[in-house]
């Protein structure tokens, strides 16, 4: 509670900056409605009518169903940060309003373009929201560290998915959603930077925990492991992306974990453990990238 209240002026400043940088956009303008036609009751989905790499289809389904769990994310964020003051509560509400556009835009695009089975998609949404399985960080400090990593991971997943799509409409939808996620990431990233000044030992301990235990928020999705494997194999989101685009630029460089001064013995131990884990993830990412290159070299 003390840390949340001490951070409230920082939250107010970062929220003001966020509102200045956020651009108004409208989901209906990103959807190619002229492609649409009625769905007959019981009409079976035919993937041949919309040819697409199955890994890309997996990524679109996971990205959308993850966004669908917004009610539970709001519950977690408001419950974790809301007691810190009005600036915290205003941020939670604004973040929720912006996130709500993401599932609208992606679902409308996928439905009108007939890229995924709408029946399976709706059943997946019902299952996901009914389960309410979301990450629940142990402390508010853990929460701030986790969402910093998660927002950037989500931005990368959306952005990389869009870049692999042939359809310019699809690329535009995913790029717009990724842009919002980037702004959300920057908000939390700079909040943790302030935390490192206010409570360095507790923050380093939280960084260590969340780096080593990180999991994307879509784990409640049916066959999430299978989808994640396909997504990783396509290079949309894998160990290499996680290491090169999240852990190194944010934890090692932006938060400057290797060079923090005046830490307690416990925090020093956590720092060493975290940096060793980051190096391990980097090695795993390089091995996976090399294996993906082998078929191409063989051919």
Image (cartoon, grey):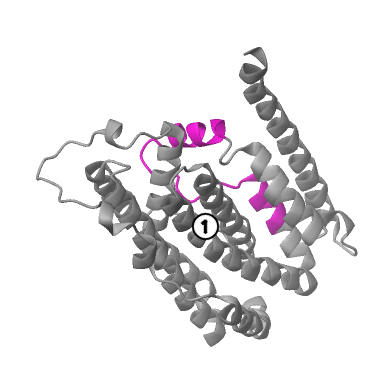
Question: Which residue is denoted by mark 1 in the rendering?
Answer: 175
* Residue 150 left/right relative to 174: right
Q: Residue 215: percent from the left, percent from the top? A: 55, 46
- State the image quarter where residue 203 is shown: bottom right
Residue at the top extreme?
298
Residue 299 located left or right of residue 100: right
Residue for point 52% across, 57% down: 175
Q: Is residue 144 above or below residue 82?
A: above
Q: Is residue 212 magenta?
A: yes
Q: Residue furthest front?
A: 34
Secondary structure under the numbered disc 1 in the rendered image: helix
- Above or below — where is 58 with respect to 136? above
Residue at 71%, 37% in the rendered image: 281
Query: Looking at the picture, does residue 299 appear above or below residue 208?
Result: above
Q: Magenta segment: does it hold 285?
A: no
Q: Which residues are magenta?
A: 206-234
- The picture places residue 5, in percent across and down from the top left corner, at 63, 83
Residue 57, x across and y down, in percent: 40, 39
């Amino acid at each position: 509670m003390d840390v949340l209240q001490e951070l409230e002026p920082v939250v107010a400043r970062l929220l003001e900056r966020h509102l200045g940088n956020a651009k108004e956009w409208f989901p209906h303008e990103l959807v190619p409605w002229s492609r649409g036609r009625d769905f007959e009751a019981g009409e079976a989905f035919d993937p041949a009518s919309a040819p697409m790499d199955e890994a890309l289809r997996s990524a679109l389904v996971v990205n959308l169903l993850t966004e669908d769990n917004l009610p539970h994310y709001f519950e977690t964020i408001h419950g974790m940060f809301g007691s810190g003051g009005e600036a915290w509560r205003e941020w939670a509400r604004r973040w929720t309003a912006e996130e709500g556009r993401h599932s609208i835009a992606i679902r409308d695009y996928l439905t009108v373009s007939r890229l995924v089975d709408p029946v399976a998609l709706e059943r997946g949404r019902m299952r996901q929201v009914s389960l309410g399985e979301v990450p629940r960080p142990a402390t508010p400090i853990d929460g701030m560290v986790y969402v910093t990593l998660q927002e950037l991971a989500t931005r990368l997943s959306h952005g990389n998915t869009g870049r692999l799509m042939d359809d310019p409409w699809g690329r535009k939808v995913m790029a717009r959603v990724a842009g919002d996620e980037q702004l959300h990431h920057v908000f939390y990233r700079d909040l943790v930077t302030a935390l490192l000044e206010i409570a360095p030992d507790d923050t380093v301990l939280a960084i260590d925990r969340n780096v080593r235990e990180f999991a994307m928020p879509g784990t409640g999705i049916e066959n999430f492991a299978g989808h994640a494997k396909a997504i990783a194999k396509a290079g949309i989101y894998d160990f290499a992306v996680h290491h090169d685009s999240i852990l190194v630029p944010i934890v090692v460089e932006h938060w400057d974990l290797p060079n923090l001064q005046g830490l307690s013995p416990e925090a020093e131990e956590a720092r060493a453990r975290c940096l060793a884990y980051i190096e391990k993830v980097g090695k795993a990412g390089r091995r996976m990238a090399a294996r993906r290159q082998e078929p191409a070299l063989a051919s």
